[in-house]
Image (tube, rainbow, N blue to C red):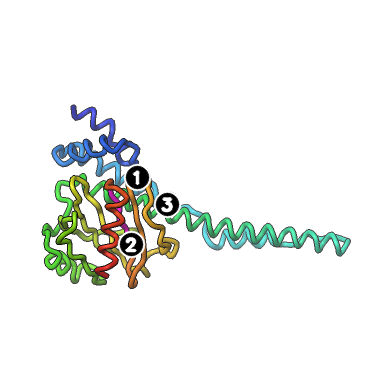
Amino acid sequence: MADDYTSKLATYLDGELSADEMRAVDAHLRNCPACAADLLGQVQLKRALQSASRRYAPSSEFRARIQQQVARPARASVWRLWLTATSVLALMFLAFMAATYLGRGALEREHAFSEIADLHVATLASASPVDVVSTDRHAVKPWFQGKIPFSFNLPELQGSDFSLIGGRVTYLGQAPGAHLIYQVRKHQISVFIFQDRSLNASLSTNLGVRRRSSFEVDCWSQDGLRYFLIGDASADDIRNLAALLRAAS
């Protein structure tokens, strides 16, 4: 039986299982230390590969040298030909710069969301998903004081479908932040909070709720903080929890 779940861990990590299969693997991971350890190893390997791919990205000096070569006008004996060639090169240069900027921003966003998904999956697979276990926001929030370089507010959940499970300190790249886990019915939602200035500017866009693999994700910036929500709950549940967090801030 465990072998059946072992074969599904890679697709579970990539969010490519059906909703029912995701829930079944979630339940199995909470009761199988061997599979949980295997999944954590896969998460660490995936993050190491992502880090290596960024490490060998072209440097800014290399980009500048290529851009100078592209923008260098070719010699021509006729003024009109020279002017036309220069115009074409200028347009190519502008297109290259725009594509580079937009492509790099999109790539950085994808890396960040991939890391967020890995953190969510790894935490739920852990035997101890939170370091402070409490449903009381007045106990969870003070626990983070002195552990991260900022403060945040948590919403009052009375009368809602959500309950707070607890939280832990986490990192996105080198940026420290808070990782909170909420439950709605049988679904768990991770809420990540970081300082806006400690993350790349390409993540500051408020994208709204959207589906990435098998997870619903929301992201926004507010009062100098960056919020990420991710879980296998419905888009409406993600949207409602986001509204509670926005109101609390």
- The amino acid marked with disc number 2 is Gln
Compared to residue 163, the image places residue 41 above or below, namely above
Taking the spot 19% from the left edge, 59% from the top edge, the residue there is 168
Residue at image point 53% right, 62% down: 60
The spot of residue 27 in percent (x, y) is 18, 39
Circle number at residue 110: 3
Residue 228 colored in magenta in the image: yes
User: Where is residue 243 shown, x and y percent of the image?
Assistant: 29, 62
* SS category of the residue bearing label 1: helix
Q: How crowded is mark 3: few (under 14 residues within 10 Å), some or many (20 or more)?
A: few
Is 208 left or right of 79, judged from the image as shown? left
Are circles 1 and 3 on residues that touch, CB within 8 Å?
Answer: no
First to last magenta residue range = 227-231
Marks 1 and 3 sit apart, C-alpha to C-alpha, by 14 Å
The amino acid pointed to by label 1 is: Lys
Instruction: Give the image location of residue 248, x and y in percent.
Output: 24, 68
Q: Is residue 219 left or right of residue 147?
A: right
Q: Which mark is residue 174?
A: 2
> Residue at coordinates 72% horizontally, 62% vertically from top-left?
72
Q: Earlier in the sequence, mark 2 or mark 3?
A: 3
Picture quadrant where residue 151 is located:
bottom left
- Classify residue 5 by image quadrant: top left
Frontmost residue, 236 versus 197: 236
For label 3, the SS is helix
Residue that carries the numbered disc 1 in the rendered image? 46
Question: Disc 1 to disc 2, how far (Cα)?
Answer: 17 Å
Q: Nearer the viewer, mark 1 or mark 3?
A: 3
